[in-house]
Amino acid sequence: MKKWNWKRTVILSIAVLLNLATMGIGSCEEVMNCLCPEDQKYSGNTKVDAWLKSAEELKIAGERVTNRTNTAMGDLAQLLGLSRDASPQEIRTALCQKFSNAGISFEMKTEPPKCTVDVDVAAKAAAECDVNYKPGEFELQCQGHCEGSCHGDCSAQCTMPSVSAHCEGECHGSCAVQVTGACYGTCRGDCSGNCSVRDESGKCAGSCDGTCQGYCETRVEGSCSGACSGECTVAYKPGGCTGRCEGSCNGSCEGRCDANVEPPQVDAECKAQVEARVKANMECEPAKVDFGFQSSGLENISEISAKMGELLAALEEAKKVQDALSNYIDTFGDAIDSILSGELSVDQLACMTTNNVFGNALSALQAVSDTVTSAVQISAVLTPDMTCS
């Protein structure tokens, strides 16, 4: 994870904005036309307000990552017999010592955490930044794997709800096959022997110890030659996946995406802001950590594996937040351009100064920077490929 140096640019930009806001006017009370409704947190300018909202969202993301990191670190430290505020180096040393004391060579294999984001985040960000963007009017394209409905070709598996329908793939639920003979499931029809349950019409709707004539329904996790009730997973669904697609989607994706989500036809100035909010809202599943079969007898080793996976996921989220911060800083020029071009009135600027909205934005960025800096320090010691040599 690279170090991020942005403070000088941001502070200078904030200073320019605040000077422009207060140039030639006194306090808010001295300006007749300066109206600051209690519910007015922003300026009323679409791009500037979207930028300010993004700062709040980044701060929330930073707090989420900080809490997740601190919890994972504290839990991991306790499992190793340390205090919850132990440093990354102390945790690494204790982990290595645990293996050394048992006479076992240290080996750690990891499967990277899977990170996804709800595609609606991109739609909301685009709508708040670009007045011409209408959610639902344009396609949201996932530039990775889509986990949801795919209005296009799904390259991998498509799982669809299937009620009393033929399934050409794997059926996950019940499978009803027409029979005249023994049924080792639920017989729905006529039973020549004893039937455990009958419906209102007198037909069998339970187990039959004789001959079943009708449909025999059984639980299945695989192929079904009859009617599948439950979910049906097929390897490839041309023309659209109306269920849950788990692969790349060459059309519009509704659900979660493991890469950038790009709404086409969005204002070019808003693109970096949309990307920033998408990255800030990405959530990562715990990484899979395996210390090898030789560690199976070590105390708390499965819990240690789980907490290490949780920590690696938190650090991966921190990288996403760092990328989001980079995209966010790129949009700062748009806010300045809006002010320099006269898009904001003196009244709006005065009210924004009174409400300290730019100061709050700077505080949010500082908090996010602290999160990233802490994650950089931790990830330099507790790495996915760490060794004890």
Image (spheres, rainbow, N blue to C red):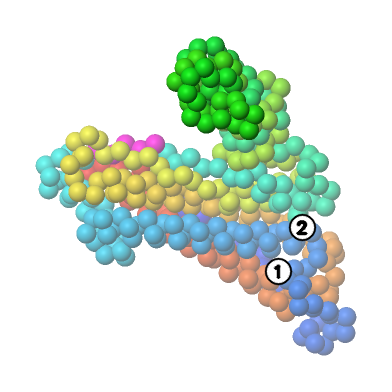
Residue annotated with mark 1: 16
| Along the line of sight, the residue nearer the viewer: 31 or 136 | 136
Q: Is residue 115 left or right of residue 87?
A: right
Q: Residue at x 52, y 48 (%)?
A: 283
Front-lying residue, 165 or 109: 165
* 217 vs 324: above or below: above
**Residue 273 appearing in the image:** yes
Q: Is residue 110 magenta?
A: yes
Position of residue 125 measured from the top left corner of the image (x, y, whole percent): 71, 51
Q: Residues within 10 Å of mark 1 (few under 14, many from 20)?
A: few
Q: Which residue is mark 2?
A: 47
| Secondary element type, mark 2 | helix
Q: Quadrant of residue 179?
A: top right
Q: Amino acid under label 2?
A: Lys
- The residue lying at 74 percent from left, 62 percent from top is 49
The residue carrying pointer 2 sits among few (fewer than 14), some (14 to 19) or many (20 or more) residues within 10 Å by Cα, namely many
Is residue 336 placed above or below 215 in the rendered structure?
A: below
* Magenta-colored span: 107-111
The label nearer to you, 1 versus 2, is 2
Give how far apart the Cα atoms at labels 1 and 2 are. 17 Å
Residue shown at 55%/57% (left/top)?
A: 61
The extreme top residue here reads: 180
Q: Residue at x 54, y 65 (%)?
A: 366
Residue situated furthest right in the rendering: 33
Asked if residue 184 can be seen in this view, the reply is no
Q: Position of residue 78 (x, y in %)?
A: 27, 59
Magenta stretch prevailing secondary structure: strand
